[in-house]
Image (spheres, rainbow, N blue to C red):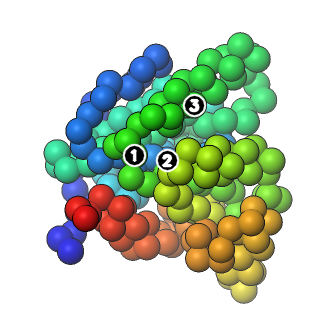
């Protein structure tokens, strides 16, 4: 299979209402606020295209990036951020739910979960929503660089088990140490391959 990444990406737009339909296959990055979605996109693409921040709630719109006219990467606003108003949280829920529903171009959802935290109910809710929509999902257990090396694999396996997922459905990931990079790139390439 021809390699896609590293490559250059083009920012298509930041959408707060509807994401315009596209014929390109889409790969979606979803997860709690601050879990590392934008950092993962930048590492996978090989270009600092998505804005990252240590302040949770940085990405408040659905940000779409076009990769060499072959696919789109979609950076969703993070959920679970306590400091935004209830109405804003409801708006995001609508925005994200509306985007994920009836979107036949979505080929893969990368569900990012913080490997350093206990399994989260909100992550479970997302996984259940994705399952109900029949969307293919790969879990990325982020920030494993913050865990002691001998504990990384067992922590990620426990996270998968806690959410009722097969062990290979969640991979260890670190944007800072480039862990899981090739696996994530390969999963994207497979997901958008024809046939
Ligand atoms: N230790 C560690 N920190 C990371 C890693 N990836 C991201 N971070 C840090 O986590 C914070 C949030 O990263 P972002 O990529 O902006 O997270 P996000 O999920 O896009 O956040 P929102 O847009 O707010 O939803 C930043 O301070 C990053 O530097 C990682 O692999 N390891
Ligand atoms: Mg972000």
Q: Which residue is mark 1?
A: 106
Q: Is residue 89 above or below residue 195?
A: above
Q: Position of residue 193 (x, y in %)?
A: 26, 63
Q: Which residue is mark 3?
A: 97
Q: Is residue 85 above or below residue 79?
A: above
Q: Which of 30 and 127 lies nearest the eye of the viewer?
A: 127
Quadrant into which the C terminus falls: bottom left
Residue visible at 59% across and 76% down? 168
Q: Position of residue 192 (x, y in %)?
A: 30, 58
Q: Which of 131 and 112 lies nearest the eye of the viewer?
A: 131
Whether label 1 lies within 8 Å of ligand 2 gets the answer no
Q: Quadrant of residue 95?
A: top right
Q: Which marked residue is nearer to the observer: mark 2 or mark 3?
A: 3
Q: Quadrant of residue 87?
A: top right
Question: Which residue in the rendered view is the most extreme toward the bottom?
Answer: 150
Q: Position of residue 179 (x, y in %)?
A: 51, 72
- Answer yes or no: is residue 50 visible: no
Q: Which residue is mark 2?
A: 29
Whether label 2 lies within 8 Å of ligand 1 gets the answer yes
Question: Disc 1 to disc 3, how far (Cα)?
Answer: 13 Å
The label on residue 187 is none
Q: In the drawing, does residue 194 fall left or right of residue 133?
A: left
Numbered disc 2: secondary structure = strand
- Answer yes or no: is residue 29 visible: yes
Residue visible at 79% across and 51% down? 120
Crowd class of label 1 (few under 14; some 14 to 19; many from 20; radius 10 Å): many
Q: In the drawing, does residue 185 fall left or right of residue 96?
A: left
Quadrant into which the N terminus falls: bottom left
Among the two numbered marks 1 and 3 on one chain, the one whose residue lies closer to the N terminus: 3
Q: Which marked residue is nearer to the observer: mark 1 or mark 2?
A: 1
Question: Which residue in the rendered view is the most extreme toward the top?
Answer: 87
């Amino acid at each position: 299979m021809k390699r896609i990444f590293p490559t250059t990406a083009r920012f298509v737009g930041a959408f707060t209402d509807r994401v315009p339909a596209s014929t390109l296959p889409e790969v979606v990055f979803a997860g709690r606020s601050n879990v590392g979605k934008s950092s993962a996109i930048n590492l996978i693409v090989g270009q600092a295209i998505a804005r990252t921040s240590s302040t949770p709630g940085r990405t408040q719109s659905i940000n779409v990036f076009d990769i060499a006219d072959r696919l789109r990467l979609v950076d969703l606003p993070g959920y679970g951020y306590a400091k935004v108003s209830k109405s804003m949280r409801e708006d995001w829920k609508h925005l994200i739910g509306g985007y994920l529903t009836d979107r036949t171009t979505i080929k893969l959802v990368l569900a990012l979960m913080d490997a350093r935290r206990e399994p989260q109910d909100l992550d479970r809710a997302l996984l259940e929503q994705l399952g109900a929509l029949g969307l293919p999902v790969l879990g990325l257990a982020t920030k494993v660089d913050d865990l002691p090396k001998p504990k990384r694999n067992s922590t990620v396996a426990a996270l998968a088990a806690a959410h009722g997922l097969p062990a290979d459905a969640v991979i260890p990931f670190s944007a800072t140490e480039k862990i899981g990079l090739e696996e994530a790139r390969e999963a994207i390439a497979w997901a958008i391959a024809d046939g």
